[in-house]
Image (cartoon, helix red, strand yellow):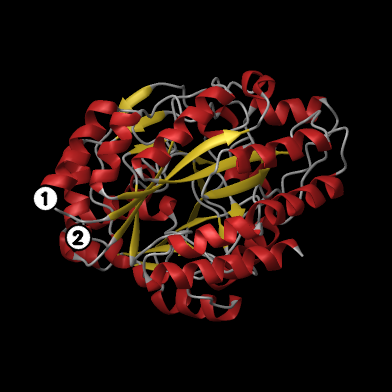
């Protein structure tokens, strides 16, 4: 197929509509806790493969554009795509499935490929039950969707089809270096996206690696193959974003700085080229140290997120987080000394947890003097040993596939607490952390830009609404 023929082939990247601000990407779907929504990374990372080949591409993000079901279907059918690449989520699958069935009725000959957290455990089941689904994307860092399109529906590593589903074996855990074409950020309406607590915009989401090499058993990332991009690829992407007017970069790596040599070189490049981005990233307390934090600060980092999870080291050991509360305290203290704002993520509602343990976790977040905190609800993700534990404990059944770690609903109790009690404690956690007078005063005097002020007001309002 020559370039002219390829340009006549239309590929649609679709984030379906929803009643909430759903984030369905990265095999970890959830509802936004406030007013934030970053670019759907599953879709973004695949755009480069098709753009490099000369196909005509379009992105419809019905969530960020607030499209109704009917308006979204009208836009899709008007584009008349030859392939649809989409994403579904355990948080929203009842809505997703109804929408995709309606869309398939309009475009019966158009193949639809989808990523999604709920698909990973049993792809054969979903491909058999949902006829609109032509294939399941298990790795959006691969060119499997392109291979499918150019080879008459053939499967390859990173994509499961009906012909291969019965023999599907999850990819082995190993570290790989991969080559990816530049993601086409320009296809997205970047001025509409936002991450919590950003101090400027517009923003863009960037990945330097895929998944995570650490073994945390409650996290889907510990089941996926760890992949890293080249330094030159990421440099090219950042230079493009700078020229495009992007001011805020959200490094969506599950563990930023896990590759020290590559990350040091990347930060040195950002500093030397005076890209002047503000940066948000997520890492581990046993990966970061003072020297790394100082370099991050110099490169523009204003928020560093850590997965704290619990105030109890026994849980950290049980679920293979593999660091302790003393390390957590030291990392937060260092970040504060360096001048980087901190966000801690905490996990409540794990099997066997009681109310006092959850309240201790909330107090730990306060004692750490974290600038921000996210209290996530334990979600028994597909294909994790955490789900196996929940099944064996009788906390869920195999039919329980809908879940939301952000806590808009609670998928399971702890054995000691009902799901309703976990929800109540989650709400108390947010109210106790964010609505302390001392905290509100600290946040008010720490605001440096009008953009940041607007975001804080919106986020605070949505957080309050979600808890009362």
When asked about the image quadrant of residue 349, the answer is: top right
**Distance between the alpha carbons at the discs numbered 2 and 1:** 10 Å
Pick whichever of labels 2 and 1 is earlier in the sequence.
2
Binning the other alpha carbons within 10 Å of mark 1 as few (below 14), some (14 to 19) or many (20 upward) gives: few
Say which element carries label 2.
Answer: helix
Residue 46 % position (x, y): 35, 51
In the picture, the quarter occupied by the C terminus is bottom right
Residue 402 % position (x, y): 72, 49
**Residue 396 seen in the figure:** no
Residue at 79% x, 50% y is: 423
Say which element carries label 1.
Answer: loop
Residue 8 % position (x, y): 26, 68
| Position of residue 24 in the picture relative to residue 155 (left or right) | right
Binning the other alpha carbons within 10 Å of mark 2 as few (below 14), some (14 to 19) or many (20 upward) gives: some
Q: Nearer the viewer, residue 137 or 288?
A: 288
Q: Nearer the viewer, residue 15 or 237?
A: 237
Which residue, given by chain and number where applicable, does mark 2 sit on?
Answer: 242
Q: Nearer the viewer, residue 165 or 206?
A: 206
| Position of residue 295 in the picture relative to residue 170 (left or right) | left
For residue 83, above or below residue 122 = below
Q: Nearer the viewer, residue 111 or 314?
A: 314
Which numbered disc covers residue 112? none
Which residue, given by chain and number where applicable, does mark 1 sit on?
Answer: 273
Residue at 36% x, 71% y is: 191
In the picture, the quarter occupied by the N terminus is bottom left
For residue 393, above or below residue 369 = above
**Residue 318 seen in the figure:** yes
Q: How many marks?
A: 2
Circle 2 or circle 1, nearest the eye: 1
Q: Are marks 2 and 1 in contact (CB under 8 Å)?
A: yes
């Amino acid at each position: 197929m020559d370039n002219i023929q390829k340009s006549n082939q239309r590929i649609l990247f679709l984030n379906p509509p929803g009643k909430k601000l759903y984030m369905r990407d990265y095999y970890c779907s959830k509802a936004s806790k406030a007013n934030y929504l970053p670019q759907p990374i599953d879709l973004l990372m695949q755009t480069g493969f098709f753009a490099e080949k000369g196909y005509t591409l379009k992105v419809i993000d019905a969530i960020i554009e607030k499209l109704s079901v009917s308006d979204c279907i009208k836009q899709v059918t008007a584009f008349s795509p030859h392939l649809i690449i989409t994403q579904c989520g355990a948080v929203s699958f009842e809505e997703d499935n109804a929408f995709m069935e309606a869309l398939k009725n309009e475009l019966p000959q158009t193949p639809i490929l989808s990523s999604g957290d709920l698909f990973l455990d049993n792809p054969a089941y979903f491909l058999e039950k949902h006829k609109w689904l032509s294939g399941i994307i298990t790795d959006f860092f691969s060119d499997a969707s392109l291979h499918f399109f150019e080879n008459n529906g053939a499967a390859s590593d990173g994509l499961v089809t009906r012909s291969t589903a019965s023999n599907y074996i999850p990819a082995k855990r190993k570290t790989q270096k991969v080559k990816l074409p530049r993601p086409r950020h320009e296809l997205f309406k970047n001025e509409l996206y936002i991450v919590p607590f950003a101090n400027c915009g517009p923003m863009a989401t960037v990945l330097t690696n895929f998944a995570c090499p650490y073994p945390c058993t409650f996290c889907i990332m510990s089941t996926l193959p760890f992949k890293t991009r080249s330094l030159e690829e990421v440099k090219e992407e950042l230079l493009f974003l700078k020229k495009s007017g992007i001011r805020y970069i959200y490094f969506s790596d599950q563990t930023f700085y896990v590759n020290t040599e590559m990350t040091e070189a990347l930060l040195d490049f950002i500093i030397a080229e005076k890209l002047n981005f503000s940066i948000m990233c997520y890492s581990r307390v046993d990966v970061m140290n003072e020297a790394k934090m100082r370099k991050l600060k110099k490169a523009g980092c204003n928020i560093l997120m850590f997965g704290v999870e619990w105030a109890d080291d026994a849980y950290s050991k049980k679920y293979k987080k593999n660091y302790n509360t003393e390390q957590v305290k030291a990392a937060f203290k260092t970040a504060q000394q360096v001048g980087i704002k901190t966000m801690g993520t905490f996990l409540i509602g794990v099997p066997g947890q009681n109310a006092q343990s959850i309240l201790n976790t909330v107090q730990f977040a306060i004692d750490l003097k974290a600038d921000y905190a996210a209290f996530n609800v334990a979600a028994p993700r597909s294909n994790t040993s955490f789900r196996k534990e929940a099944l064996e404990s009788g906390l869920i059944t195999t039919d329980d596939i809908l879940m939301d770690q952000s806590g808009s609903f609670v998928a399971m109790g702890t054995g000691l607490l009902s799901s309703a009690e976990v929800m109540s404690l989650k709400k108390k956690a947010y109210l106790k952390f964010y609505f302390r007078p001392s905290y509100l005063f600290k946040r008010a005097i720490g605001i440096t830009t009008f953009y940041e002020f607007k975001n804080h007001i919106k986020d605070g309002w949505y957080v309050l609404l979600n808890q009362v």
